[in-house]
Structures are given as structure tokens and as C-alpha cells.
Amino acid sequence: MACSGCGRKFPDAYDSNERSVRDLPWSAFRTTVHIEVYRVKCPECGVKIEKVPLLPSKAPFSQRFEDAVGLACEGAAARQVARRFGLAESTVRAIDLRYLERWKASRRQPPLREMGVDEIHVGKKEKFLTVVCNLETAEPLWFGRERKKETLDVFFRDELSTRQRRGIEAACVDMWEPFRLSMAEWIPNCRIVYDKFHVMQHANAAVDEVRRAEFFRKGGRMRDLVKGKRWLLLSRWVNLTAGKRQELNQLFALNRKVFKAYLLKESLDRLWTYHYEGAMLNYLQRWIDQLRWQRLQAFQKLAVMLLDHLEGILNYCRTKVPLGVVEAVNGNIKALLRRGRGYKNLRYLLLKAQRMAATRTEFVVFKKAA
Ligand SMILES: [Zn+2]
């Protein structure tokens, strides 16, 4: 018999006990297995229960039963799985969490060379979640509440060794000062890249600001006309159907400023097609020149921001970090949050998202959409 604490083997038992665990069903019958388990007297751990691989925890379930529940949770919400197995929803979540922890413990962690840092807006109360991911494996590595410098500091301090920190060559981040400060402190040699996804998020926000400023003043009939067109303005032209393009054109006919803003957003996208710093810088300069006399304040602000972060934008030419990964990881987490409420346990959400990335359940779909 082996001690469940340290694994040391003993020839004799201290005492024995009986446990009943739910196992996989036999035909139409629910099955309970009664097992006699021994306790050993370990000089290290004291009186401990013996190690039984089929009994993963103190909960009254066999490992194969837990594996079946965990597998079911990969494709369905906890509530549905609970109904199917005749369990409480909270029990299903607890089983799923243990299932994922066992999976996590059994796999090797690939090295972190290129990291992504992003924040996700999760709601009014909790506000933001900081997400760190491995760009090479497209897998989320860590979640932190809020998006302060201290948030990211925790990741560098608690999750990585000095050697691991030195191994990070590049990082894809939002132009969010607290993150930059944290990285300057912990991974000073890492190359920071402001990627397309994050910059375009700011460009979209600028378009939205112009739209609001232009049409809010107008009121009445005009406001009704642009109602519900927000997402159209935030869509890429290439992704729109002929009908939707027509709708946008009608909108542009009404307001030249919104038209200009949309064009500016669309053309900024081309910045990431350049492979040489000089060419990229040149394009950016010409893009900024177009802003002159346009009186588009939102875009003036964006231009200042881009110039302030120029080094990190041009870094894309030096380090071709994979585009779209941060966005895909984000999408998966948001899908998880939408599907099942009750991810108060961040560890559970993280394991779930990691498993999703490892099995590529939804990732491919998001990649295509991007
Ligand atoms: Zn022991």
C-alpha cells in the first residue's frame, strides 16, 4: 500500500474503511461501487489513506465517472450535463475542475518565448480581466483581475522564474501604459510589439467617436437613419455584402466626416503589410498627413498615440509575431463567459480556456472570422 501523501510504500495497513463511489452506469442502471480502502501509518504524513488511482478525490465518484462528466462538459454547459447525469450543477463544476486539473498536471508546459497581454472587459462590476497568453501555442497562460501594473507584476513575480523571464523575446500588448511599465521592470530586454489587433481597436474607437459626435448633434430623422449602423462602421469593407455596402454608402452620402473616418480606419490596416521599417514609417507618415485640415479630433488623438508608440509599432518589422492570436484567445474566453455564467473561479475559467485551445474546439472558427 502506498501513502497518498508522499507515495512511500507499506506492507501493513493501519486500519480499513469502506467507501461508496458512483461509477459508470451498467446498462440502464446507475452503478455504485463499494470499495474497502486501507489507511497506512506514515512516519512523514501520519495516518493517511492509501493511494488508489481509481479514486481521484474525497468526492464519491470514481475516476472514470469523473472523466465521463468532464468530457461531457467540453461540449455542453454545466447545467445540461447536470441534468443528463442527475447531479447538481455545482457538483458537475467541481468534477469538471478536478478533471481539468488532472489533465493539466499530465502535460508539459511549452516554453514562453512570445507572449501576448490583453485585457477583456467582463462586466460592469468586475470590469477588466488581464489575460496573458503564449503566442506560439495560442494558449492562455494566466488571468488576473483588473488591468493595473500590479496585476501584471503578479504574473511575472509568481508564475515565472528568472530564467523563464529572460527567455521571453517578444510581447504583443495593447498601448496601455501600466502594462508597459510592468514589462519594463520585469522583462526589460523583451521586444514590445503593438500589434494590428490592438491598434485597430483604437482606430475603431475613433470612428465610433466621430459617428457619435456627428450624428448626435443632428437629432431627429438623421439619428433614426444611423441607428443600428454602428457595427457596420466597425466592419471591414471586404467583409460586407453588397447590400451592407449600399447602406454604408447612404450613410457616407449624409456625412463626409464619417466617410473620411471610415476611410482612414480602413487604410490604416495596410500598415501591417509592410516588411521594412522605412516603408512602414513612410506609410504611417502619409497616413498622418491626410489628417491635416480634416478636423477629426478623435483621429488627431490616435495619431499622437501612434507616434508615442512608434518604436513598438515598427517592431513588427523586426519581430513577426503571429497576428490574430491575441484576438482568437480573447474570442474563446468571451465565448466561454457568454455560454456559462458562474466563472467566479478564475482558475476554472483558465483551465477551461486552455483545454479549449489545446483541443482547438472553437479556435479554428475564430481564426477564420478574423
Ligand atoms: Zn506519507
Image (spheres, rainbow, N blue to C red):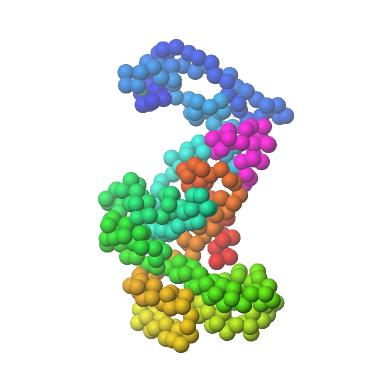
Residue 20 appears in the picture as rendered? yes
Q: Quadrant of residue 271?
A: bottom left
Q: Quadrant of the C terminus?
A: bottom right
Residue found farthest to the right:
28
In the picture, measured across the screen, residue 82 lies left or right of residue 118, that is right
Rendered view: 6 above or below 96: above
Residue found farthest to the bottom:
293
In the picture, measured across the screen, residue 35 lies left or right of residue 82, that is left
Residue 36 at what x, y percent from top left?
Answer: 52, 16
Residue 56 at what x, y percent from top left?
Answer: 50, 30
Residue 283 appears in the picture as rendered? no
> For the point 55% across and 63% down, which residue is it?
367
Residue 98 at what x, y percent from top left?
Answer: 50, 36
In the picture, measured across the screen, residue 342 lies left or right of residue 152, that is right
> For the point 41% across and 59% down, which residue is it?
116
**Numbered circles on residues, count:** 0
Rendered view: 288 above or below 302: below
- Is residue 287 on the magenta stretch? no
> For the point 47% across and 38% down, which residue is it?
102
Main SS type for the magenta part? helix
> For the point 37% across and 51% down, which residue is it?
151
Ligand 1 location (quadrant): top left
Q: Quadrant of residue 234?
A: bottom right
Residue found farthest to the top:
15
Residue 197 at what x, y percent from top left?
Answer: 47, 67
Q: Quadrant of residue 104?
A: top left
Q: Quadrant of the N terminus?
A: top left
Rendered view: 100 above or below 269: above
- Is residue 80 on the magenta stretch? yes
* Magenta range: 75-96
